Image (cartoon, helix red, strand yellow):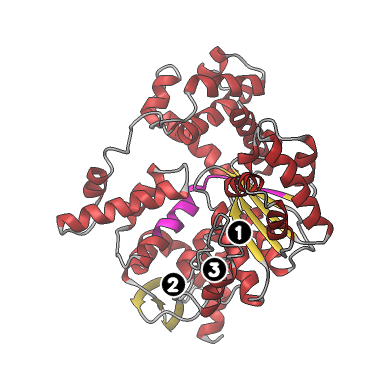
Amino acid sequence: MELDDIWQAALGELEVALSKANYTTWFRGTRLVDIQPPQAVISVPSAFVKKWFEKRYDQEILKTLKKLTDGAVTHITYMIGAPLPRAHTTTPQPTTHAPSPVSQNAQASIDLTPPNTMTTLRLRPEYTFDSFIVGSNNRLAYAACQAVAQTPGKMHNPLVVYGGVGLGKTHLVHAIGNTLLAHNPKLKLLYTSCEDFANDFVQSIQSKKSESFKKKYRSIDVFLVDDIQFLSRKEGTQEEFFHTFNALHQNDRQIVMTSDRIPTAIPDLEGRLSSRFGMGMVADIQPPDLETRLAIVQEKATRAGMDIDPDVLSFIAESFMSNIRELEGALNKVIAYCQLQGEQPTLDLARAALKDQLGAGVKKGATTPDKLIDIVTRHFSITKEEIMGKQRNRRFVHPRHILMYLMRLECGMSFPQIGDALGGKDHTTIMHGSGVIEKELGRDDELREELGSIRTILYAK
């Protein structure tokens, strides 16, 4: 086989063996440049990737090449070379190119608001499908958004994407808008927040310009709305949103909405609205798993032009698991801190930069450990004593692991703090229990649904 054929075959096997996020992030721009038994030479796009391959993927790659060359390759050397264009698969690839003229069209086309009303939000041109890191936590939402961008008004109408703060909901909505405007710059597309919709509605009543309001919101082709949980307990706004929704949907106009919770958990949301939101597709985004977080910080470091040691990136990814915004903020803080020190990022410098954020306890405004214990024990029909005990029966171990995971995710607690809250358990026990859930989330749909049910109850309270 030719070198390219061997490498394509190797990539095919590696794609199956690795997570989608890891494969997409690390293996684009790589190629096999030489084989002189027993050595193979692989070109990688940067010193950072070279270091990461040597530390994390060397044995996996070697095993694959050894199999494909009938044992001829027993050693791999990595060299830094010019990256190739996009990888051979159709896997979404993060991009670093400058915004295209299409993105400028998005900026120009989005503002449909007359001068006397509130300005709508703008699409961010850097938010594209290519720049979105896909992992097990967001794959369904990503696929649904791509389908909508390809055939608006035909599939998944309406589409509701829900999940916690900073998980990528808005990124996906912008990606839909940017893609649609790239294909048709004249498309009547309106992107707004639910709060702006409500304010616009109130202003139209006060200024006696209800017809202008209706024309603005009902004469469009695509309606993108962020944060529909803002409809909670707003009867007048719900009434107007209901009629706007019907007018658009009956004419096959695409509607995409985001929410911080599943629509059925939005307090005092009218049943007729809730049922309509569920007519199409409702897709959740969970917090990213460790592999996806690693892919995100590596991509952000590369975009920043920083060559950061893999151990430092792993430390950041392992320490911040709640949302992407928090993760990116931690990376930016480490980079800024090290630049001020005039040194390359190290584990010690990263710990120093993030010391105020690590082990800081329960996050302001977050749920409490006692509330989580109550919800989880009720969900599994066990007692507080049983979930905090030491019984190894799966009936107790599984809920205990879920509780550990949620305490870290929802309360922002450190492993030792969770151990103390659960009766003095060792922090390594907490690390293991939380890790079990995080690992299984990517492949266990039943577990994802279970966690979704618990978090729905949590957010509804």
N-terminal label among 2 and 1 = 2
Q: Nearer the viewer, residue 21 or 178?
A: 178
Q: Which of the 4 image quadrants contains residue 67? A: bottom right
Dot 3 alpha-carbon crowd within 10 angstroms: few under 14, some 14 to 19, many 20 or more: some
* In this view, 368 is above or below 258: above
Determine the secondary structure under disc 2.
loop
Numbered range of the magenta stretch? 282-298
Mark number displayed over residue 130: 3
Q: Sequence-wise, which precedes: disc 2 or disc 3?
A: 2
Which residue reaches farthest left? 342
Residue 96's tag is 2
Q: Nearer the viewer, mark 2 or mark 1?
A: 1
What is the x, y in percent for residue 123?
54, 63
Task: Say whether marks 1 and 3 touch (CB < 8 Å).
Answer: no
**Labelled pair 2, 3 in contact (Cβ < 8 Å):** no
- Residue type at tag 3: Asp
